[in-house]
Amino acid sequence: MENDDDRLAAAFRAAVQDAPEAGFDHEDVLAGSRRLARRRRTLVAGGVAAAAIVLAGGVTTGVVLTRDGGTTTSAAAPAPERAEQAGPGSAADAAAPRAAAAPSAPRSGAPLGPAAGDCVNPQDPELRALVDAALPGLAGAREAPTTMICRPGGGREVNLEVTDGALTGLLTVVYTPAGGPPAQTASAVGWVTAEVPTASGGTVVVTSRGDADSGGVPFADDVRPLAEALGPQL
Amino acid sequence: MDDAAERAFAEYFRARRDAVRRTAFLLCGDWHRADDHAQSAFVALHRHWHRIRDPQALDAWVRRTLVRAVVDESRRPWRRERPVEITPDRAATGPSADGVATRTALVEALRAVPARQRAVLVLRYLEGLDVTATAEALGCSTGTVKSQTAHGLAALRAILGDTLDDLRAAG
């Protein structure tokens, strides 16, 4: 005997029984997929170029301002550089132009290189800027919770909770400077990882893994291009 | 994708296109938008095809993509939906109304139900999912599905009045 739910289900099915002819076919889907793939490749390539321009512009601005006044700190200058400048009237004034060329400050055409500080920042803002520029789909991604264990060595990390269509997961980018301890190289089934040597002699490892209920790995096709895009920048 | 994967996708597409379109239609209430949403879901599926570890999970993957897209769209400023206070025109939907008018009334009424509640009703009554599968598709708890089902049916009843019982009787 039918109950109310059965009857309601039948009513729902009846409501869609007069479907018009479909407005798309298999070829349309394939064309759409190819179009998205092209767009994503273009974004990755364009993002890296934009990141290089932004970094170069920021450093150039910092150099110009410090040369003009000798005491001005540019907001566009990288944070480690600002930290090295003690302020007006200090001995750091004279060293300001030299500070603009400090090892941790990216120069036009130069890699970002190792970070300053004793412990690796698990959410390194300079690396995050490069990642966002290289793959704009990550720009709004939330920072993932990380442990506070101090990992020395001047490395950089970004750990993000990412969403890629219906797929969700964790995407990590780990830069290890030359001579540093190896970054995570272990990989589980379902993880997608790419490791690329960097311009400064280190390595960058990009890993994406899906959440347990994700059904797949987010940005899996972008892991390798992202690592290859970041390599020359680090 | 390699040839075997392309063939498998094509087969899946042929088998599931119309079902996905029907679900999309009841979720958004418009066949043109339903086609757009369904096509986008299949495009996303094609791009992620080789990454979906469990072939048995394809339906759930497409369903989740589709529902998320429709619900997200309903929240966008230019297409934000609002539950209506005014009952849709039901001039031809009395106990003696013909089937087409009755079906139209149901579609119109669904459009007036809040998007999440509508999604729960469509997944449960059109797709035939149980509470657990519906919760997985929507990324929420089973308790939420139960409460959204109750609220959704209450909203339908408020809009359709006796016509809901007619639908149940005539279904």
Image (tube, grey):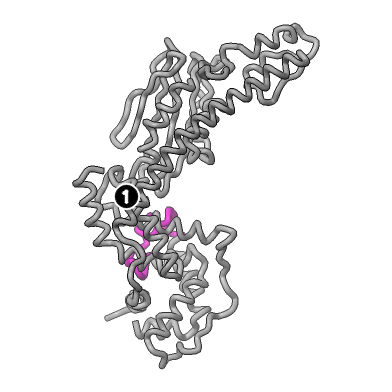
A74 relative position to B159: left or right: right
The secondary element bearing badge 1 is classed as: helix
Q: Quadrant of the C terminus of chain B?
A: bottom left
**Magenta region's main secondary structure?**
helix
- The residue that appears at 31% across and 66% down in the rendered structure is B18
Q: Residue furthest right?
A: A89
x then y, percent, for residue A81: 64, 17
- The residue that appears at 36% across and 70% down in the rendered structure is B125
Residue under pointer 1: B46
* Pointer 1 chain: B
Q: Is residue B52 above or below residue A118?
A: below
Q: Is residue B89 visible?
A: yes
- The residue that appears at 44% across and 31% down in the rendered structure is A172
x then y, percent, for residue B112: 52, 72
Give residue B14's quadrant in the image.
bottom left
x then y, percent, for residue A187: 32, 29
Which region shows up in magenta?
A: B123-144
| Camera-nearest residue between A105 and A211 | A105
Q: Quadrant of the N terminus of chain B?
A: top left
x then y, percent, for residue B73: 50, 59
Give residue B133's quadrant in the image.
bottom left
Residue B136 sits inside the magenta stretch: yes
